[in-house]
Amino acid sequence: MNRTFALVLILLALGLIAYNVTLVDFENPIQGDSTIALIGIVASLCAIVLMLIFMTSKKIDKKLKK
C-alpha cells in the first residue's frame, strides 16, 4: 500500500466524519439515528488513527532498511 492510497483513505474517513456530524442531533445524541452517526464518527476516527500508525511504521521500516 502506497502513501497516496493511505491519504485517500484518510480523506474518505474525514468526509464520513463530516457527513455523520450533520446527522447527529446534539440535543439527544443517544437516540435514533444520532447513535448510528456517533458510531460512524468513532469508526472513522479509528480508521484515521490506524492509517497514521501504518504510515509511521512504514517510515520506521524504511529508515531501518537504510
Image: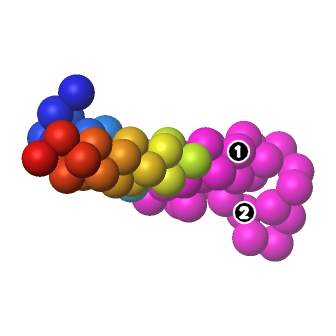
According to the picture, the residue beneath numbered tag 2 turns out to be 25
Badge 2: few (under 14), some or many (20 or more) residues near its Cα, within 10 Å?
Answer: some
What are the residue bounds of the magenta stretch?
17-45
Q: Which one is earlier in the sequence, the residue at label 2 or at label 1? A: 2
Q: Residue at x 57, y 47 (%)?
A: 46
56 horizontally vs 6: left or right: right
Q: Residue at x 78, y 47 (%)?
A: 35
Q: Quadrant of residue 39?
A: top right
Badge 1: few (under 14), some or many (20 or more) residues near its Cα, within 10 Å?
Answer: few
Tag 1: amino acid: Ile
Toward the viewer: 21 or 52?
A: 52
Element at label 2: loop
Q: Residue at x 19, y 52 (%)?
A: 63
Toward the viewer: 1 or 36?
A: 1
Of badges 2 and 1, the one in the foreground is 1
**Is residue 46 shown to the viewer in this render?**
yes
**Residue 32 falls within the magenta-colored stretch:** yes
Element at label 1: helix
**Extreme residue in the bottom direction:** 27
* Position in image of residue 4 (x %, y %): 13, 41
Measured in 3D between alpha carbons, the distance from the residue under mark 2 to the one under mark 1, in whole angstroms, is 13 Å
Toward the viewer: 64 or 8?
A: 64
Q: How many marks are shown on the rendered structure?
A: 2
